Image (cartoon, helix red, strand yellow):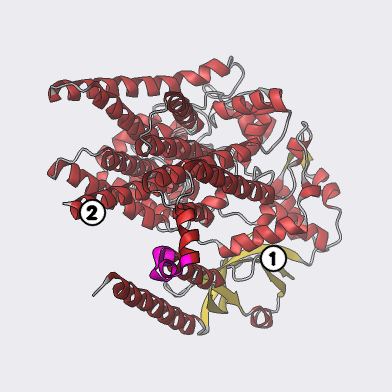
Amino acid sequence: MNNKKLFVILFISFILIFSTTLIIFSILGNKNRIGYLGEFKFDESHINNTLELNGFDTSEIKKLFTIDNILDSNALTNYIFTNKNITNYSYGFRLKYYDKIFRNSDIYSVYIDTNKVIKDNNFIKSIIIDINGSPFGNLISYKKIDLEKIDNISYILKIKPKLIIWFLFVIFIIFIIYNYDCSYIKNNKKLYHSYLIYKKVSEKYFVIFTIIISALLFLIHFYIGFPGYFHNPDNIVILRQSILKDYSNWHPVIIAVTLNFLYKIFGQNTFYITLINLLCLYSGMVFIIIALYFKYKKTRFILLFLVLFIADIYFPTLTQLKDITCSMFIWLSISLIFFLLIETKKNKILNIILCFIIFISLFLALLWRHNAIVTIYPIILFLIFLFTSKLKLKSKIKNVFIFLSISFFASILLVLVVKVNPYIWIKSNDGYYYKDIDYDALYSKYGYIIDYFTWMDINDRFARNAPNNIFAIQIAACASANDDDSMIPKEWYEKGKTFEDLKKLYKAESLFGDTFVFSFFNQRIFKPGNLENISKVWLKYILKYPKDYIIHILRFSKTVIFKDFGWSITSSYLNGIPQSLEEIGFKNYNTMFNDARIYIYNLFHNLFINIPIDFLVLISIVLFFSSLFLIIKNKILDKILLYSFFLSFSSLATIIIVVFFTPINDGRYIFPIIPINIVLIICFSLFIEIIYRNKGNT
């Protein structure tokens, strides 16, 4: 059977199998199922909406509950629920499911029968779903909702349109690629002549064309997401510190320092980190595409730009979360390394420039996220390997010794850079709360619940108590499972809190470490400042109860790996600017967010597909052991294979550090594995292609 017949059979089989699968899933999803409404939210936006629905002046009411510029949210909430003049309450909710398979996912959108919900629950006035097909929504109730859930909610599932669109698109792309060298073109002289000219397009013009395409995609991306999402409390704190120059290392100090530097050159704006993210993203892909074109002279590699349209890449890069920007610096550096490995032409000036950018990117990534050293070190090891291999020493023992020596000193240097950097920018820690805190005086001044922004202003500038949430939740896991508080110092507890409270909180919040220690949580068990010897107590509990520690880690890892990434933000998140930032000079871009941008953004948001985290974790594990096997068993020291190994090592190290040393199951912490795996898959595929081609030649 020739290749053409084989392709046709496989192509038709693919279409039939996928089409049949879609039809079956569509029929199964269209069946009425029962779920329930849960996770009711009555946060600031719903408080505001409730006041407005009942004809109150929101700003005036809030003034009544504001003392020393701090809003007492608990008192305001109590006022709302006890005021007889308030008869409409706004709540956020999420549809939850009894069925473990047929629920909202990357395949299905969910549709609630809202009319039936209102009919069955006479206290509900109206229901509005956030986005068509979303499980999230808002409702207006005639009474306060004390229920944990509203049951008997009827819903159906529909196949997401973007799956069908992408299916058709993939068919089209496969057809184009296959017919790139088809006999039809060769039999048509005019077409074949054009084809030969097309094949002889110079490298220069392809590079220019790639850069133009990248620039256009970049401008569209930047336009629809401008100025980016910075409403996360972490970002607001960083932006405030960047303009006030009141630096702290709770969030890596280098971020605020870099922004302050940019303000001095270009003026005070909120979009700089978004711009950095997108510049790194598109620059990295340009170098990957050009490198592959130089090797194979195939213009089809321009299609790799489609990778950037994965929702879990496209939308998170519009956020200004430190984890995303750190990942973009890593993406740029590993893309440039890939380019230098593939492009063998000797251009010393270009090589020097690219090497400089690689080291600057890795340096910024190292300082942009507290645990980035774990992700970056395997990449540094590969660079050290490249350096030692150029020495061309005859003795393998000397080669190994030099590699290990430089690797050891590099690890020491990286740790020193991370540790010393905050002391360069933070000049004084006097007057900030950390040790020897008079908690009575502290709570008398700020209240028992000290909001996040106030705590960031008064807390230890070197953030030595920042890891307490990680230690506390893991101590709670071991202690509560064995009813053993013998190693927890009594002075750690807040007044009125006991070990029984710790057990109850762990049962309720076993995946959210912040609630155990941080000042802005009313239910916290431990004091928010220094907890003496907490790391030692943590280690003692792990050694005493290793089984329960492992159970906690496995449960936590399951929620990190088997979930959506969760930062594919909708257009509503890009609107407005917090008042606290506007007051210190940041511009408000509300007027620029027009209907055209919203339409394009929402269109992309509905079309682009997500990539499951568990799939990337599996890829990392499989390629790590596959590349390791090939290196050890077959003694293959090909640079592309070795690069694949170190990239998979980097991805696995990131997964491990997130699983073992992360306080909450937030998808942003594991984001670095997404760009790393893209380059990893390209690298390993390239190695397999080289092996296959070499076997064909022999």
Q: CA distance from mark 1 to mark 2?
A: 67 Å
SS type, badge 2? helix
Q: Is residue 565 visible?
A: no
- Label 2 belongs to which residue? 692
Could you say which is closer to the camera, residue 492 or residue 141? Answer: 141
In the rendered structure, the answer to whether residue 101 lies left or right of residue 398 reads right
- As shown in the figure, which amino acid type bears the numbered disc 1? Lys
The residue under the point 26% across, 44% down is 546
Q: Tell me the quarter of the image containing the N terminus.
A: bottom left
Location of residue 487 by image quarter: top left
In the rendered structure, the answer to whether residue 288 lies left or right of residue 445 reads left
In the rendered structure, the answer to whether residue 150 lies left or right of residue 445 reads left
SS type, badge 1? loop
| Magenta-tinted stretch | 177-189
The residue under the point 80% across, 58% down is 51
Question: Is 443 drawn above or below residue 428 in the view shown?
Answer: below
In the rendered structure, the answer to whether residue 480 lies left or right of residue 435 reads left
Q: Which mark is residue 426?
A: none
The residue under the point 60% across, 22% down is 432
CB atoms of marks 1 and 2 within 8 Å = no
Which tag is nearer the camera, tag 1 or tag 2?
Answer: 2
Q: Position of residue 209 (x, y in %)?
A: 56, 47
